[in-house]
Image (tube, rainbow, N blue to C red):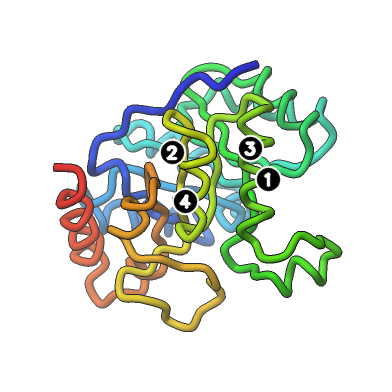
Amino acid sequence: MSAVGPVALSARERLIFALDAPSGADALAWVDRLGDAVQFYKIGMELLASGDYFTVLDELARRDKRVFVDLKFFDIPATVAGVIRGLSRWPVTYATIHGWHAGMMEAAAEARGGELRLLAVTVLTSMDGSDLRAMGINGGEPAGIVAQRALAAQAAGIDGVICSGQEAGMIRAATGPGFSIVCPGIRPGGPVGDDQKRTVGVAEAFALGADAIVVGRPISKAQDPRAAAEAIQHEIAGVFN
């Protein structure tokens, strides 16, 4: 099955905030705090453990926010297909699966429906070459592994990848237009010494071919989170407007 084409994103929808919160109440407090500075939210594993996951998802949709389900599905093809088929009934724009197995990706692509677009996780931005070698992956530095997995995902009918901005240019050159590239690990002020090892800035990510960026701590840890989000939006507007 082939990809269904990229999502048409407005400039302000190209900033995705990582809504990492321990409860639904905390998550929605962040949505209130950020207001119209953020139009797209990623909800992941921490919120899942709260039991409020789909309540928050529905509330985001009710507020006309886009939703990115980042649960990195990885299982036998039939199981992943079942999850994606069910998730397609919800108002979700992006969902992640691991890009490690062609049969699983093909099954997921066949099962997706609605507006859902699938992003394959290539190599986590918290990992570098030494981490890959420790896992028994002997392919050199992350860039080579990321390129292989991006091309495998495209061949399997997956709509795009989530990857470090450091690899976005290489992936765009290899896959061509129409393949979505979403980049986490964005550090507007440069590296800050946290667990993200392969980071880039906002304008750099888009110059290299990203369609959207995921930003968490540079907003959530800022003295004024809404102002920090608006500053990123201003930088994005300078790229796209």
- Residue 85: image quadrant is top right
Cα distance in 3D space between marks 3 and 1: 5 Å
Cα distance in 3D space between marks 2 and 3: 25 Å
Query: In the picture shown, does residue 34 fall above or below 76?
Result: below
Q: Earlier in the sequence, mark 1 or mark 4?
A: 1
Mark 2 and mark 4 residues within 8 Å of each other at the beta carbon: no
Sort mark 1 into few (<14), some (14-19) or many (20+) by Cα contacts within 10 Å. Answer: some
* SS at mark 1 in the image: helix
Q: Earlier in the sequence, mark 4 or mark 3?
A: 3
* SS at mark 2 in the image: strand
Cα distance in 3D space between marks 2 and 1: 28 Å
Q: Quadrant of the N terminus?
A: top right
Sort mark 3 into few (<14), some (14-19) or many (20+) by Cα contacts within 10 Å. Answer: some
Cα distance in 3D space between marks 1 and 4: 13 Å
* SS at mark 4 in the image: helix
What residue is shown at x 65% (from left), y 61% (from top)? 142
- Residue type at mark 2 is Val
* Residue that numbered label 3 is attached to: 151
Query: In the picture shown, does residue 106 fall above or below 144?
Result: above
Q: Quadrant of the C terminus?
A: top left
> Which of 106/71 is in front?
106
What residue is shown at x 44% (from left), y 34% (from top)? 58
* Residue that numbered label 4 is attached to: 168
Q: Which mark is residue 148?
A: 1
* SS at mark 3 in the image: helix
- Residue type at mark 4 is Ala
* Residue that numbered label 2 is attached to: 67
> Which of 25/100 is in front?
100
Query: In the picture shown, does residue 15 fall above or below 131?
Result: above
- Residue type at mark 1 is Gln
Mark 3 and mark 1 residues within 8 Å of each other at the beta carbon: yes
What residue is shown at x 77% (from left), y 33% (from top)? 102
